[in-house]
Amino acid sequence: MHQSLYLDRLTVPGFARVEVVETSPSTNAELVAAVRADPAAWPAPSALIAEEQTAGRGRAGRSWQTPPRAGLTVSLLLRPRVPAEAMGWLPLLAGLAVVRTVSDGGITAAVKWPNDVLLPAVDTVAGLGLYRKVAGILAEVVPGTTGPGSPAAGETGSPGAGEAPAVVLGIGLNVSQSADELPVPTATSLALAGHPRPDRTDVLVRMLGEVHAVVRRWEQAGGDAAAAGLLDEYAAVSATLGTRVRAELAGGAGVLEGEAVGLDGTGALVLRLESGEERAVTAGDVWHLR
């Protein structure tokens, strides 16, 4: 049974503003527009959550809908104080935070580079292997808007102090959907996977806290995910690293096949090709091969 969010339980330490709306075409598009119109009204970190999303946006212009009160559609306003070249890590770290959120009660989630969170399945799906997608992540910079850095704004000596560009980080997580409510047969929900407590409010509060904690560690290490220990933690829950993959590069720039052997300092996926050459993939669709 789908549940409304309990607003009296939505106090999230570290967040300056948390807003819940009944419906939104796209929380990312709505938050981007709001930040452009009035950056000061959205201090970092803030969150916009919709009980129902009717035209959500994903990577490569993909769209989807979520049934009312069945999933979590959340957009976060962050202003990370990290070098620009490290920003590719943000959706990866958000994936790590989601894994930590849902990996309890015997469920073990995994991340698929660059922006999916997966749960184990009993049968193989092309491109995913023995997994189904439970969450997707999309990050976009809002040009021309700056504000106090996130998430440690105002702390003396903090790398979060000062001015930083705004980034909207969207997370869509399937919570209580039934099989016929999912957008594609390769998806799943926490309820379908047997999560013992798929309470949307509890999951949301925990997820926001996990994102806050991970981003804070990343900032305090100056955007160096390896120095923060986050590279190793991400690798430990990766369904992509150590497997053979096909990468369809963004913009039709070609296709690469090889073993996913690591991540570089920018969050790019490093493939070792048959020739032994290593290539970094910064954007594109990645398919896990048997």
Image: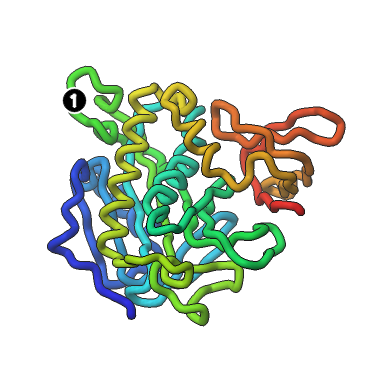
Report which residue position mark 1 lands on: 155
Q: Residue at x 47, y 59 (%)?
A: 135
Is residue 217 visible in the rendered image? The answer is yes
Residue at the extreme left: 8
Render colour scheme: rainbow
Residue at the extreme front: 106
Q: Residue at x 67, y 58 (%)?
A: 129
* Left or right placement of residue 259 versus residue 73 in this view: right
Q: Position of residue 221 (x, y in %)?
A: 38, 22
Q: Position of residue 83 (x, y in %)?
A: 44, 25
Q: Residue at x 25, y 67 (%)?
A: 21
- Going by the numbered disc 1, the residue's amino acid type is Glu
Q: Quadrant of the C terminus?
A: bottom right
* Left or right placement of residue 276 versus residue 65 in this view: right
Residue at the extreme right: 275
Q: Position of residue 246 (x, y in %)?
A: 75, 48
Q: Residue at x 55, y 34 (%)?
A: 267
Foreground pick, 254 / 71: 71
Is residue 145 visible in the rendered image? The answer is no
